[in-house]
Image (cartoon, rainbow, N blue to C red):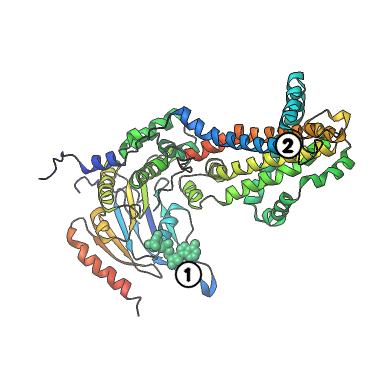
Amino acid sequence: MTAIVDAPPDQLTPVRFHQVGKAFGSGRKAVVALDGVDLEVGAGEFVCLLGASGCGKTTLLNLVAGLDRPTSGRIELNSSRPAVVFQEAALMPWLTAAGNVELPLRMAGVPKAQRRAKAAELLELVRLAGLGDKRPHELSGGMRQRVALARALASTTDSADAGKPSLLLMDEPFSALDAITRDVLQGELLRIWRATGTAILFVTHDVREAVRLGQRVVLLSSRPGRVVQEWDVDDAPDAVDEINTALRKVISSHAA
Amino acid sequence: MPLDVQEGSVEAGLDALDTPVNAPEGSRVRRIAARVLPPVGAIVVLVAIWQALWAAAFWPEFKLPSPAAVWGQIWQLVTSGDILELFWVSVHRAVIGFAISLLIAVPLGLAIANIRVVRRGIGPLVSGLQSLPSVAWVPAAILWFGLNDRAIYWVVLLGAVPSIANGLVSGLDQVPPILPRVGKALGAGRFGGIRYILLPAALPGFLGGLKQGWAFSWRSLMAAELIATSPELGEGLGQFLHNGMSLSDISMVFAGIVLIFVVGVGIELLVFRPLENSVLRARGLTSSAH
Ligand SMILES: Nc1ncnc2c1ncn2[C@@H]1O[C@H](COP(=O)(O)OP(=O)(O)OP(=O)(O)O)[C@@H](O)[C@H]1O
Ligand SMILES: [Mg+2]
């Protein structure tokens, strides 16, 4: 990873958590999903959030995406509208691939010609240039996920946010794909990250994926989700074993 | 011996494998024939049985007319041009009634689906109305409005509005919850979410409701025309059927039934079926065998 853009000192941090907590329900039956989370993602930084199933990774992303509100603490968002890629591609089945990419632009009132051009550009970025007129059901799982990525990127291009750093949130986007497609898409994502310079907060429960993709890996504990440890993996590519051990320790601590 | 595999990137190879190929379509003539022949065959068999029963003279002629006599009735309507008036009177009423029903049912369905109090309050009422035969409203409508078009439209509305509204509600209820969330993440506001996500996502269920609403409005219209007959109302298919009964002309009665059936099914086949098929096909919801 050579093309890391060093953030100028005056550049804003896209997102910063301040002792964020989230509980579902209230009273004694409340489920505390997140508790006292402090986390920040720098401009252009690629951070992987790692944790066992049900530890609150999705909840955390939803808070950043504005789909949910924290019950305590505060999230400081300095980016343009975060782009979100969900675990399922969740493309609109009545729209073509290009129509899906254009959808956020249409809802933002971007004129048609401009929309077209932007969608073509983004489909080109995810290497689906020729398939814009295909329907979601005609595409493979990996292609759908790439359309979803292009669509998410389209949602951040908001003229009102010009100058703000961009932020991409991804919730286990490749976990439903076969191994070789996943491998290829990880490479594509790194390419797109370098090309766009966007900050990425990437959720996964796969240690290898986290180490391959991220510059920094953040391990979350379960019930309640807290930040356990962080690793700079950019210059420690053999961190897999170490992180695996830590993850196992977190999981086995629940056996008692 | 290893196969002679050309070097290329894995990315490009995967894409080539994943790229959809357009399946060749069978010949057009054959596809149409496969669709048209079975129902035509069924009709031929039915008419043959009918002819045989008539020839065996199980029932007297005034109870079971011959196919030829019924066809004669219809042919006479066609050659005299009277059939145009019959169709016009009934179909224009059904279409106007259906259009008004649509204008009432869509806001109603949206309100039931989106506002909890409304759903609890009138949701069950609207579902209940769907199972109340709308003919039951004919006497009240005649007492309220007199023997005129308004009475007929009232009955049609009560037949069609509940089906259309219920279709829309169930269409909206079946929208996968992930889609509105995605919409919100993509920056949809409240109305953008309804306009660009919810309504299109609910379209298949809504179309089902429309189809059923059409069937109900046609049914209600025929019931109303059959009961509410008056010279001022003009002669539609229902009145034609009624006249057949008054004249004790069984071939005329059969001709009326056939025409009512043909119009009801015809509009479904010509308007609603293609609409539904194209919507479902665009979303990959039909198997290619259909
Ligand atoms: N809407 C909700 N209501 C109640 N509890 C919830 C809700 N959403 C999540 N939870 C709970 O919060 C906890 C964290 O859930 P979350 O979906 O964020 O986990 P996750 O880390 O994304 O899991 P996975 O790896 O399975 O996707 C879980 O215990 C879950 O049961
Ligand atoms: Mg999750």
User: Is there CB contact under 8 Å for labels 1 and 2?
Assistant: no
Q: Nearer the viewer, residue B190 or A40?
A: B190
Gap between marks 1 and 2, in whole Å?
A: 76 Å
What residue do we see at 40% from left, 70% from top?
A: A223
In the image, residue A218 sits, relative to residue B287, either above or below, namely below
What residue do we see at 74% from left, 19% from top?
A: B79
Any atom of ligand 1 within 8 Å of the CB at mark 1? yes
Identity, as a three-letter code, of the amino acid under mark 1: Val
- In the orientation shown, which residue stands out farthest toward the left? B1
Chain for disc number 2: B
The residue pinned by badge 1 equals A31
Would residue B258 appear left or right of A145 to someone viewing this image? right
Q: Position of residue B136 (x, y in %)?
A: 81, 47
Chain for disc number 1: A
In the image, residue A99 sits, relative to residue B172, either above or below, namely above
- In the orientation shown, which residue stands out farthest toward the front? B56
Q: Position of residue A205 (x, y in %)?
A: 32, 61
Q: Secondary structure at mark 1?
A: strand
The residue pinned by badge 2 equals B54
Would residue B225 appear left or right of B258 to someone viewing this image? right
Q: Quadrant of the C terminus of chain A?
A: bottom left
